[in-house]
Amino acid sequence: KINKADAKVQKIRERKRRKGSEDRKVGSEVFDKITLETLYKLAKQDYIDILNGAISTGKEANVLKGITKDETYVAVKIYRIATSDFKKMDYYVHGDPRFNVKTKNKRQLIYAWVSKEFKNLKRLYNAGVNVPEPYISANNVLIIEFIGDEKGNPAQPVRNQPPKNPEEFFNKLLVQLKKFVHEGKLVHGDLSNYNILNQNEEPVIIDVSQSVVLDNPISHELLQRDIKTLVNEYKKLGVKTSYDEVYEYVDFK
Ligand code: ADP
Ligand code: MN
C-alpha cells in the first residue's frame, strides 16, 4: 500500500522522468535524484508525510512546508547541490574546529554544511535561544520546527514584517543575541532582519549554517559585523541605540 508521501515523491519522480533531466526544476523546486531519495527515506521514517508548497527559494536552499502524519507542520530546508555558494561554505566549515572537513568534493561539503546547521540549531535550542527546534538532517535536507501560526501561515522575516513596537522587539532580540553568544557559545555570522522571523512580535533567529564557535578565529569579527548590521537596521526602524551600547551589552570575551 502506497501512502501519501510515497505518492507525492512518486509523482515528482514521474514528472522528472518525463522531463528527462536530473537537475531540471519542478515548479519552483529543484530535486535531483539523491534529494528525492533523501526525502523518500525521511518520509518512510515519518519525519514528513506531505510536502505542501514553497516558503522560500533562496540563493542556496529552498524552504518548503511539510506536514507530518500527525498533522503538524515542519519546515524542510533543501540545499541545492548544483547552485550552492561553494566558496562561502569552504571558508566557514574549514574554520570550525568541530568540522574536520578535508574534502574538496562539493556534495560532501554541502552535507557537512547541513549537518553543521543542524548541530548549531541543536546547541542553540538546548541553550534556550529562540530558534526553530531541529528534528533531523540527512544529506542536503534539514527538517526543523515550522515557525508560523496554527493555520500553516509561515512567520515573516522582520524585513518584510517590521515589529509594531521596534524598541520592545529590539530589546527582546538583544536578550536572544546575548544568550546566543553566552549560552549557545556561537556567533551567528549572518544576522540581519532577513534571518529574524517575527512570530507574534517575538524574534526567532534562523539560518545558522554559517554560525561559528567562539574559538573560531573569525568569531569576534563576525559578531562585530552582526552588531553593526542590527544597529543600522533598528535605527532605521526608529530605535535609539548605538554600536557601543549593544557591543557592551553582549559582552564578548
Ligand atoms: P536561506 O537564507 O539560506 O535561503 P533561511 O534559513 O534563511 O535560508 O530560510 C529562508 C526563508 O525561509 C526565511 O527567510 C523564512 O521566510 C523561511 N523559513 C526558514 N526557516 C523557517 C521555519 N523554520 N519556519 C518558517 N519559515 C522558515
Ligand atoms: Mn536566510
Image (cartoon, rainbow, N blue to C red):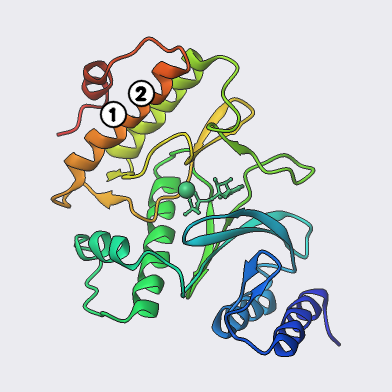
| Element carrying mark 2 | helix
| Element carrying mark 1 | helix
* Residue picked out by circle 1: 228
Amino acid type shown at disc 2 = Asn
Q: Quadrant of the C terminus?
A: top left
Amino acid type shown at disc 1 = Lys
At x 57%, y 80%, the residue is 23
- Answer above or below: position of 158 versus 217: above
Q: Residue furthest top?
A: 240
At x 34%, y 31%, the residue is 229
Q: Between residues 80 and 202, which one lies in front from this camera angle?
A: 80
Q: Are the residues flagged by discs 2 and 1 in contact, CB closer than 8 Å?
A: yes
Mark 1 CB within 8 Å of ligand 2: no
Picture coordinates of residue 228, whole percent (x, y): 28, 28
At x 73%, y 59%, the residue is 53
Q: Is residue 70 left or right of residue 157?
A: right
